[in-house]
Amino acid sequence: MLGRFAPMIYGPTVLFAVGEGAVLPLLPVLAARLGADIAVAGLVASALVVGQLVGNLPAGWAVSRIGERLSMAIALGIALLGVAGALLAPNIGVLMASVLLIGLCAAVFGLARHSFMTTRVPLAYRARALSLLGGTFRLGMFVGPFIAAALLAIFGTEDAALWFFGICLVATALLVLLGPDPETRIAAEDARNTRTDASTPRTADDRAADPEGVDRATVDPEDTGEAVTGSIPVSERIGVLRTMWQNRGVLARLGLAAASLSSVRSARQLVMPLWGLSIGLDASTIALVVGISGAIDFALFYVSGQIMDRFGRLWAVLPSMVLMGGGFLALSVTHDLTDAAMWFAAFAMVLAVGNGLSSGILLTLGADVAPKSNPAPFLGSWRTLTDAGGAATPLLVSGITAVWSIGGAVALIGVVGLVGAAAFSRYVPRFVPRVR
């Protein structure tokens, strides 16, 4: 299934992620061009994350009601409006609203593909498939900034990255609307396989194994021969809020553990440049260290899926959380050492390995515990929790740095990582099915 439909499953995600990755680093520059100071420029950049956070629950409703393909097509059209608004924005308010709109559409796009994979990918290789999906997002965030830099060098304006994102959105929409739809194709194949199995006569071995069984070849699977009274039962689609209530146990336990992982990941992206700046490194050195750690992180995305499918989810998430939590704690005491730059580079690599080992784990755990018949509403709640963990971290780090120190903020993130590791060790065996 993944081999036959790989271009349709992963292709749209790659295009969207590369376009988004090209625009993301330039959002503060676009805001500054309209007269924003550093604080307001940071607020504009954070509007993308806020849009994804706010959009997860509506995305769950939309995918559940109108399907994956139509949801993605509508989201892509609205995202194009957001890009146009950013290109033509006369002031900061319009730019921030446009970025927020793009974030909302990114939530719909991400959840639609997550829901499809949850429903269709067998448990035996679910983690590898979802790690590949997570890897496509990482590819976009890794390659996108380089494309943006090339476009700036060629055209000399930040608007070129927005035009590139718009072209990526149009290409994605054409692929989604004109390419074969894996959602309907695979559902049709499953239905044909079910009818074929139902019409296959039972062999002597089948009857020996199940003497009480009925020969399926002699029975019409759609006609029992009995009178039908009352309504015909159908699959009930449960709304987002009711789904949250019915699954409050797993969301309050495993969901909060997942939010801690998202928090530590977000802290890594924020803290490493700030730490390098605080110990006196120049911008080129910081960029080099962050770039190398990003390459290590990206290189490990499929390894994570292999570990999860072969040995279980804990074998990936626990080493990841321990490495990142312990790495942050150790880094917090190196600020004033004479070889602080060496320790900065060393722990940047440790954190990259830890983050790489967690690639796809939030997608996989969400798929493991989601209701199989209608996962989209649950996944909307799950992604809201995980995105909230990531969105709250910059505020936490900034606040603690202001009232205490950056070392104290980094130490607290390390504690969050180790507490999250303990929560995963407690709740993953309780809620997640065993991998056989």
Image: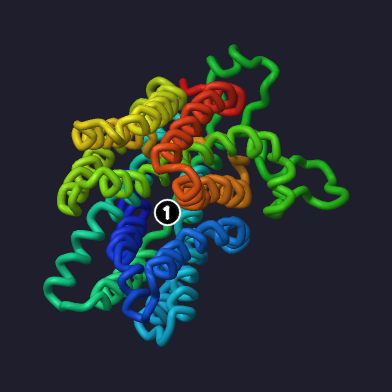
User: Which residue is rendered at x = 22% and y = 66% of the image?
Assistant: 148
Residue type at numbered disc 1: Pro
- Which residue is identified by label 1? 182
Q: Is residue 59 left or right of residue 33?
A: right
Place of residue 55 in the rendered image (x, y in percent of width and height, measured from the top left): 55, 61
- Whether residue 308 is visible to the viewer of this picture, yes or no, is no
Q: Is residue 330 left or right of residue 198?
A: left
Q: Secondary structure at mark 1?
A: helix
Q: Is residue 413 above or below residue 434?
A: below
Place of residue 136 in the rendered image (x, y in percent of width and height, measured from the top left): 32, 50
Place of residue 338 in the rendered image (x, y in percent of width and height, measured from the top left): 21, 32
Q: Is residue 340 above or below residue 48?
A: above
Quadrant the N terminus occupies: top left
Residue that protrudes farthest toward the top in the picture: 208
Q: Is residue 435 above or below residue 84?
A: above
Q: Is residue 27 above or below residue 196?
A: below
User: Which residue is rendered at x = 38% and y = 72% of the image?
Assistant: 37
Residue in the foreground of this view, choosing between 374 and 293 = 293
Residue in the foreground of this view, choosing between 262 and 28 = 28
Quarter occupied by residue 31: bottom left
